[in-house]
C-alpha cells in the first residue's frame, strides 16, 4: 500500500510501497514499538517510534501549531474508519513537504532533556 516515510535524520520525505502487516511498519520505522500521535480528518494516521525520545536522535520534526516534537522515522498511512484496516495514504506528500519544520540534533537533545 502507498505510505509516506519521513526521516528526520536525513530530512527526507518519500512515498513508499509498504507491504501489509505490522512487521513491515516496524521495519520501515526501524523500531520495536510504535504509537500513533496524529490522526487526520481523512483517516490518515502518523505513526512513530514510541521509544524515540529515549534513543540518540539526530533530527526531529514539528508542524505548525504542534506543541511537541516527533523524533525518529515517521510513517503516514491511511485508515479505513469502518474496519480499522490500513490503506493507501490520502494526504498528498506536498502537504508534508510544505509544513514540516525540521529540527536538528541540538534542538532534539534540548527537547529530550525534558523527559529523560
Image (spheres, helix red, strand yellow):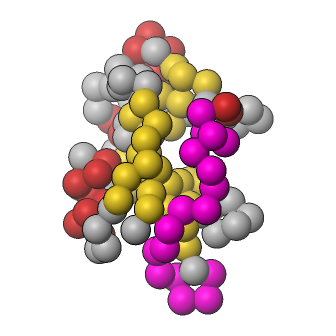
Reply above or below: 69 against 50.
above
Can residue 19 be seen at all in this image of the molecule? yes
Reply above or below: 8 against 70.
above
Whole-percent x, y for residue 113 in the image: 45, 21
Reply above or below: 73 against 77.
above
Q: Nearer the viewer, residue 102 or 18?
A: 18
| 83 relative to 14 in the view: left or right | right
Magenta residues, start to end: 81-97
The quadrant of the image that shows the C terminus is top left
Q: What residue do we see at 74% from left, 64% from top?
A: 41
Whole-percent x, y for residue 76 in the image: 50, 55
Q: What residue do we see at 36% from left, 25% from top?
A: 9
Q: What residue do we see at 70% from left, 67% from top?
A: 42
The quadrant of the image that shows the N terminus is bottom left
Q: Nearer the viewer, residue 29 or 16?
A: 16
Whole-percent x, y for residue 80 in the image: 57, 80
- Within the magenta stretch, is there residue 67? no
Reply above or below: 88 against 52.
below
Amino acid at each position: 500500500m502507498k505510505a509516506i516515510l519521513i526521516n528526520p535524520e536525513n530530512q527526507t520525505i518519500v512515498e513508499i510501497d509498504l507491504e501489509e502487516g505490522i512487521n513491515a511498519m516496524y521495519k520501515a520505522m526501524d523500531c520495536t514499538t510504535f504509537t500513533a500521535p496524529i490522526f487526520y480528518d481523512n483517516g490518515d494516521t502518523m505513526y512513530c517510534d514510541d521509544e524515540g525520545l529515549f534513543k540518540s536522535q539526530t533530527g526531529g520534526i514539528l508542524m505548525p501549531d504542534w506543541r511537541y516534537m516527533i523524533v525518529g522515522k515517521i510513517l503516514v498511512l491511511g485508515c479505513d474508519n469502518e474496519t480499522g484496516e490500513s490503506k493507501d495514504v490520502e494526504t498528498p506528500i506536498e502537504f508534508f513537504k510544505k509544513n514540516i519544520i525540521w529540527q536538528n540534533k541540538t534542538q532534539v537533545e534540548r527537547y529530550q532533556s525534558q523527559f529523560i
